[in-house]
Image (cartoon, helix red, strand yellow):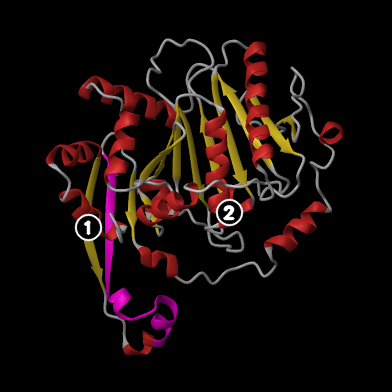
């Protein structure tokens, strides 16, 4: 398929062979509507400058995608990417980082940060600390040796993940009831990081996984019981049907049809292995170097570290990565719609997949 975009998704699904169409519609519902308006002539110069033409705003195609299994949803309108953002920081990211470096509280972590009661984990490029203001009982921080979170190599990225995983093993040994692991990387203030120095968060919780992850597990289990097939395999397959997925060295990669925010990519693997870590690095460098992403949220979820009463059969190691927009903007990228209703998206997952596929087709260096 060539020259496809999200505006044509409903048409693309309608053209699929009956069996493929039925599978897609089992998981996703797609509807398309047109928003219309009549700007006064006095607005025309501003509209043309902001959106390219008056016609571009007079009739706007809006695509609504809903995941029937998980109840995730997104409304796509490419014009949202051109809307005016008047409140911006005048200081560049580089300048803000340089100023923050002068007051870096993570500069000497062994001296200036607390350790977990089971000690620290030291990687080759990072070290752990105990989080001062905890999300949960076992909540640590993986502090990168490199101050700038956007300056990472393949080796560094792999070490960050390996160190977080070793932290989880030690935390589980300390408290065997804690078995549900979550690795989170909030890159820069736009993504919720309160400290500029590069760092990730690691958590290990008890009783059950965090609410949204547990909700996904239950939805996948219900899907397996209802249809006799694995939800994650079928989710990947339906993304393939509309050219939004690829596989590389055992890792399934898809550009999410119901993203929480722009440019969301999901990676799935049977294990937290080297191939997955390398694909995470490649997707991150693609976002940074090709899309210009400077602030992002990344999550890594694994099945529990020990046996549980509930079933995790067929649940993969799952990584989600999304773009949080321009750090110089003071306007939040999350509003009432995202909190109470449904995500509003300006990026195009079909276009994103085409660019990512081209990028991953070549060997990615250790930039």
- In percent of the image, x 74 and y 17: which residue is there? 118
Residue in front for this viewpoint, 285 or 173 = 285
Q: Which residues are magenta?
A: 45-67
- In percent of the image, x 60 and y 68: which residue is there? 88
Q: Point out the tag, 2 or 1, that comes first from the N-terminus.
A: 1
Which picture quadrant has residue 329? bottom right
Relative horizontal placement of residue 249, taking residue 187 as reference (left or right): left
Task: Check the image and name the residue furthest to the front.
Answer: 362
Residue in front for this viewpoint, 71 or 14 = 14
Q: Is residue 118 magenta?
A: no
Picture coordinates of residue 33, whole percent (x, y):
22, 61
Residue in front for this viewpoint, 340 or 68 = 68
Above or below, 51 against 269 in this view is below
Relative horizontal placement of residue 115, taking residue 243 as reference (left or right): right
Which picture quadrant has residue 34? bottom left
Relative horizontal placement of residue 28, taking residue 320 as reference (left or right): left
Say which element carries label 1. strand
The residue beneath circle 2 is 288
Indicate the quadrant containing the N terminus: top left, top right, bottom left or bottom right. bottom left
Picture coordinates of residue 48, whole percent (x, y):
39, 82
What is the spatial separation of the Cα atoms under label 2 and label 1, in whole angstroms? 31 Å
Above or below, 175 against 243 in this view is above
Picture coordinates of residue 225, whole percent (x, y):
24, 19
Taking the image as drawn, is residue 2 in sight? yes
Residue in front for this viewpoint, 313 or 174 = 313
Which-is-in-front pick, marks 2 and 1? 2
Q: Which mark is residue 161?
A: none
The residue beneath circle 1 is 32
Picture coordinates of residue 349, whole percent (x, y):
37, 52
Above or below, 82 against 285 in this view is below
Q: For the residues labelled 2 and 1, say whether their Cβ atoms are less than 8 Å apart.
A: no
């Amino acid at each position: 398929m060539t020259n496809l975009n999200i505006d044509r998704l409903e048409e693309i699904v309608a053209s699929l062979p009956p069996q493929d169409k039925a599978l897609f519609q089992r998981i996703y519902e797609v509807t398309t509507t047109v928003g219309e308006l009549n700007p006064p002539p006095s607005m025309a110069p501003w509209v043309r400058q902001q959106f390219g033409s008056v016609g571009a705003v007079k009739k706007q195609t809006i695509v609504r995608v809903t995941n029937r299994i998980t109840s995730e949803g997104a409304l796509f309108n490419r014009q949202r990417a051109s809307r005016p953002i008047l409140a911006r920081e005048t200081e560049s990211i580089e300048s803000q980082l340089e100023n923050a470096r002068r007051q870096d509280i993570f500069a000497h972590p062994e001296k200036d940060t607390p350790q977990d009661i089971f000690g620290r984990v030291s990687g080759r490029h990072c070290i752990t600390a105990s989080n001062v203001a905890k999300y949960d009982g076992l909540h640590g921080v993986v502090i990168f040796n490199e101050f700038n979170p956007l300056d990472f190599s393949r080796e560094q990225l792999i070490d960050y993940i390996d160190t977080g995983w070793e932290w989880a093993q030690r935390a589980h040994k300390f408290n065997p009831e804690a078995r549900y692991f979550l690795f989170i990387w909030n890159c820069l203030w736009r993504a919720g990081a309160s400290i500029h120095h590069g760092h990730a968060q690691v958590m290990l919780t008890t009783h059950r996984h965090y609410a949204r992850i547990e909700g996904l597990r239950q939805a996948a289990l219900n899907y397996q019981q209802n249809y006799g097939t694995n939800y994650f395999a079928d989710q990947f397959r339906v993304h393939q049907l509309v050219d939004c997925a690829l596989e590389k060295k055992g890792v399934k990669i898809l550009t999410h049809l119901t993203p929480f925010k722009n440019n969301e990519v999901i990676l799935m693997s049977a294990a937290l292995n080297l191939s997955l870590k390398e694909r995470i690095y490649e997707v991150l460098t693609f976002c940074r170097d090709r899309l210009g992403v400077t602030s992002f949220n990344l999550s890594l979820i694994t099945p529990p570290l020990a046996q549980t009463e509930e079933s995790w059969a067929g649940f993969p190691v799952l990584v989600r990565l999304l773009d949080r927009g321009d750090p110089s903007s003071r306007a939040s990228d999350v509003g009432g719609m995202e909190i109470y209703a449904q995500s509003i998206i300006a990026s195009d997952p079909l276009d994103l997949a085409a660019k990512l596929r081209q990028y991953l087709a070549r060997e990615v260096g250790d930039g």
